[in-house]
Image (spheres, grey):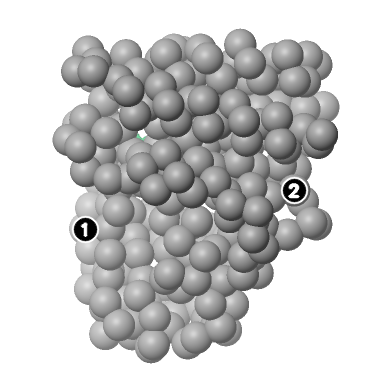
């Protein structure tokens, strides 16, 4: 059995914790409407406990519990990057989906990724250079042009200073595609581009745990994934993200 199968098993169990949570306590974090629930913390503790046994030498970076600071040591060797619930607001308001996101960095670059959506029982996985999968089937992003595709964006909700620019880009993107969507989970948005459900995702600021796993899945599904200036992602901290499926050959003019 490969490590990725162990990680998938653990992600699925984390999904059960998410689905069976009953009225968890909600805590506020820094930024506009930025929440954490008892369930986020519970899942993160569960993931660390179980993943430690799979790869004892790995370091851990996670969204919750003060484990969110990237250190130099994390760019050497192995490091798990965890988002126990991507889409915490969705989870609080029962607005689906929310996902469990697990990336494994090797020497600071994504090496393995698992994202699980327990609402639809959809398990995404990828290993660098070996393709992306959803429930064991190889996936590729869509080969259709943007004009014939949906596009999705994130509102960078915790950073009010980015609102105007976000909606300016969204306004200029709308006439270039079929229509726009906003799901409430960045990891899921990129999985949808990888799956070919939509063909572009952008957001002006997301954190490492939001994009580390999804970026590998999208890349392995043939997507181009950069920051919105077209630079490679750093995999060290927050960044803007532009993820385009195979059919989007050029950066749309609203980003230039
Ligand atoms: C958030 C979601 C949301 C995105 C935010 C993220 P969280 O993560 O991915 O879609 O717009 O930028 O921070 O807080 O639900 O884990
Ligand atoms: Ca997140």
Tell me which corner region of the image, top left, top right, bottom left or bottom right, holds residue 225. bottom right
* Image quarter hosting the N terminus: top right
Please state the horizontal and vertical placement of residue 132, each as a whole percent of the image.
67, 57
Q: In this rendering, does residue 126 appear at all? A: yes
Q: Is residue 155 left or right of residue 223?
A: left
165 or 10: nearer the eye? 10
Q: Is 94 located above or below residue 82 in the figure?
A: below
144 or 146: nearer the eye? 144
Residue tagged 2: 127
The residue sitting at 62% across, 30% down in the picture is: 9
Please state the horizontal and vertical placement of residue 234, each as a whole percent of the image.
64, 46
The residue sitting at 49% across, 49% down in the picture is: 122
140 or 236: nearer the eye? 140
Tell me which corner region of the image, top left, top right, bottom left or bottom right, holds residue 158. top left
Between the C-alphas of marks 2 and 1, the distance is: 37 Å
Q: Secondary structure at mark 1?
A: helix
**Residue 164 badge:** 1
């Amino acid at each position: 059995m490969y490590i990725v199968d162990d990680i998938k098993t653990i992600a699925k169990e984390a999904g059960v914790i998410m689905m069976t949570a009953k009225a968890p306590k909600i805590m506020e974090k820094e930024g506009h409407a930025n929440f954490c629930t008892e369930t986020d913390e519970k899942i993160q503790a569960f993931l660390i406990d179980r993943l430690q046994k799979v790869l004892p030498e790995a370091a851990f970076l996670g969204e919750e519990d003060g484990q969110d600071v990237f250190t130099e040591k994390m760019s050497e060797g192995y490091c798990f990057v965890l988002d126990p619930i991507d889409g915490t607001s969705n989870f609080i308001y029962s607005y689906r989906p929310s996902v469990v996101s697990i990336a494994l960095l090797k020497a600071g670059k994504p090496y393995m990724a698992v994202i699980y959506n327990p609402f639809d029982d959809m398990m995404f996985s990828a290993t660098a250079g070996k393709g992306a999968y959803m429930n064991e089937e190889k996936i590729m992003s869509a080969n259709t042009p943007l004009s014939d595709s949906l596009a999705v964006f994130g509102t960078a909700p915790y950073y009010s200073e980015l609102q105007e620019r976000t909606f300016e880009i969204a306004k200029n993107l709308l006439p270039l595609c079929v229509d726009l969507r906003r799901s409430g989970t960045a990891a899921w948005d990129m999985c949808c581009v990888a799956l070919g459900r939509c063909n572009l995702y952008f957001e002006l600021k997301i954190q490492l745990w939001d994009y580390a796993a999804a970026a590998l899945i999208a890349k392995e599904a043939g997507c181009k994934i950069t920051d919105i200036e077209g630079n490679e992602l750093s995999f060290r901290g927050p960044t803007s993200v532009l993820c385009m499926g195979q059919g989007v050959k050029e950066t749309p003019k609203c980003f230039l």
